[in-house]
Image (cartoon, rainbow, N blue to C red):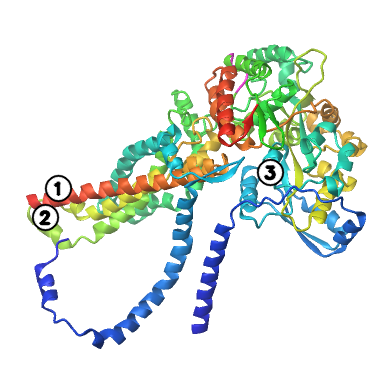
Amino acid sequence: MTQSPALSGERADFPVLPRRRTSSAKRKQHRAAYLFLLPFFVVFVTMLVVPLVYAGYLSLFESKLIGGETFAGFANYARALTDPAFLGGLGRVGLFFVVQVPIMLGLALFFALALDSARARGSKAIRLFIYMPYAVPAVVATLMWGYLYGPDFGPIAQIARAVGFGTPDFLSPGSILGSMMNIVTWEFVGYNMIIMYAALRSIPAELYEAAEIDGAGQFRLAWSVKIPAIRPAIMLTVIFSIIGSFQLFAEPSLLNAIAPNAITNSFTPNYYGYNLAFINQELNYAAAIAFLLGIVIAVVSYVVQLSEERRERREMRLS
Amino acid sequence: MNKKARRTALALIGGAVSIGLLLTGCSPSSDGGSAPGAVSQDDIDTAMTTPTKLTFWTWVPDIENEVKLFEEKYPAIDVTVENVGQGLPHYQKLRSAIEAGEGAPDVAQVEYQYIPSFVLNDSLLDLTSYGADELSADYVDWAWNQVSPDAAVWAIPQDVGPMGHLYREDILAKAGITEPPATWDDYATAAKAVKDSTGSYISNLGATQAGQMIGFFWQAGVKPFGYDGKETVTIDVNSDGAKKVASYWTSLIQQDLISTDVDFQDQWYQGLANGKYAGWLTAAWGPIFLQGTAESTSGLWRAATLPQWKKGEKVSGNWGGSSDAILASSKNPIAAYELAKFINNDHESAMKLATEQFLFPPQVSVLEDPAFVDQKSEFYGGQQVNSLFADISKTVDTDFQWVPFMDYVYSTYEETIGSVIADKGDLAAALHAWQDQLVKYAKAQGFTVK
């Protein structure tokens, strides 16, 4: 992403034109551009900015069932930062991110490379099959897996019993996070694979030819050409995954019905916020939790991106 | 084209403005619950002949049939029935609408335990000045006390769930038990016999089912909750009485004589149908529910009273049931009240609810109607199940109360007691943790805790 010197030089050479000459035509164009952008901004402001500001405003108050609303400053934030339920949930999704995301993206990358190498027969059909779970809504997927995990009548448990392994308990407090990782992986491998696959398809063929002339095999090709070439795409999936795992909600809220002992009210920060708002009726505190979660996600995404950029720069300097 | 674009822009701006208004209009209105002078018959006649539109939020299936009877009697009133969800989602939407100050229905279904949470913020209309206090004799005492714990009347009772014991006669007979257990001691003995000789559990204790456990508390005379209608709540979930009940279940769970599956889930439905559980300690709405769930076992089931703590006693508790309340924000309170009253008080409508929707009635005239009590049920071997539960209903303790934050009570039950049940731990000890959480929450919310 370096600026070519030719380009910047050219810009400096441009004569500075008197403003008035372009203004009427330019202004018309500008006006048209703003007009086209207007619908987006109206919706953006009313549906995103206003609610966000309102939530921020709410988070600064304290509302009691007796006594009503009072201004509380940052008391809700201070409470959240010492709330073991919130921090525990944050730790849980952090663990989820550290364990599940590498597995999921690793699988996605593997599938994308395998499909791209054109070695696999019927690659179009396979691509579709891997992608299909993403088309299943998260709610349906969770309900389906909930049935598969069932200890008495779930097929996995029945097979395990028939083979003599006893009944595995996928829904116990100790294993529920793993079971959830499995569901999310199943859901999103295809989605991430498609992003990586699309990036792989746009690598210019000359690079492959050059590598082949240098005597590179398929693995070497994948490792030294393909993966570096699609690094921006991989980065994109990482960022999406950070947001996805820190915002886990549908899975715990649905699994709660069949495994209420394993899923506590504060299992994930989002689920905690939801319960705070609608069960505990602590709307203001829930708003503070939501804001903090947003900040955490922004920070983690930024740190990941920054470290990647740094690595890229370092590698460039080395080469 | 230009015009259209302008119109869209205007509409969008209009939308933005109205959202802004919505946001600023979010402070709860405090003008409710006041009781103006009594409503005269003239007022009622005028209200019932003036064309009026009412909205009614309920999740009772096919309640349109009863509403139709009402509309036939009062053609000027047009009722829209809306099902916005069952239980929690229903209350969430109701609370949001109340907070927003618009969009709330005129009449809403409210379960008894949630009435105080709506009384708390003056969301319900006190029905005394509309003549509701005259209805008290029409309902069984304990049900009336649920909607009218003091002088005010907050709703009209619709259905109740006095608790009884449904059991598989065939499985118990295999274990040599021919009579349903009369006391809880007998029940424990029977549980052992059933487990040893048939492998079935005598019943299932829903691991996270607070309603069932609170029903057991109710039967044992435990008074875990209280609310004075203002700012004082009583929280006493770890009293000696509650501990006695909790220890009883702990012992059965630890001996593996009772299962602790989560109820109202696939596993549990299957368990009822395939004999994993030889019985179900449930409410008066249970018999019909079971009939739909375990069709293949028709004729094998019987109904009885709950086992008793003292031999010879006849006491029961309640689990579930609903009432219809009028929102204080209703613009047509008279018509709304007449709707709630008609549906749950008119004999034809109440009989329909009891015999077609199978809601167990709190209304005395239905409980005495032969067309209801003399019904024989084949699923229960020809037993008159309605008659049995009508008798049980007379034995429910009349003085049981709630706190205005039962959602929180139930959700912390799941956290503190539910996990202990699953781990086969000591329930009596877990009651302390539950108590602590509830007291802490109540104090943080500004209540005085007794």
Q: Is residue B1 visible?
A: no
- The foreground one among B177 and B434 is B434
Q: Amino acid at mark 3?
A: Phe
- The foreground one among A169 and B340 is B340
Tell me which segment is drawn in magenta: B255-259
Q: Quadrant of the C terminus of chain B?
A: top right
Name the residue beneath numbered marker 3: B118
State which tag comes first along the sequence, 1 or 2.
2
Question: Mark 1 touching mark 2, by CB under 8 A?
Answer: yes
Question: Could you say where residue B97 lies in the image, as x and y percent from the top left?
Answer: 63, 53
Name the residue beneath numbered marker 2: A211
Element type at marker 3? Answer: helix
Q: Quadrant of residue A52?
A: bottom left
Q: Amino acid at mark 2?
A: Ala
Between the C-alphas of marks 1 and 2, the distance is 9 Å
Residue A297 included in the magenta stretch of the image: no
Chain bearing mark 3? B
**Residue sitting at x 56%, y 43%:** A278
Work out whether B107 lies above or below B209. below
Give the left or right position of residue B375, taking residue B289 as reference: right
Question: Could you say where residue B393 lies in the image, as x and y percent from the top left?
Answer: 82, 29
Work out whether B238 lies above or below B270. above
Give the left or right position of residue A299, taking residue B47 as reference: left
Question: Mark 1 touching mark 3, by CB under 8 A?
Answer: no
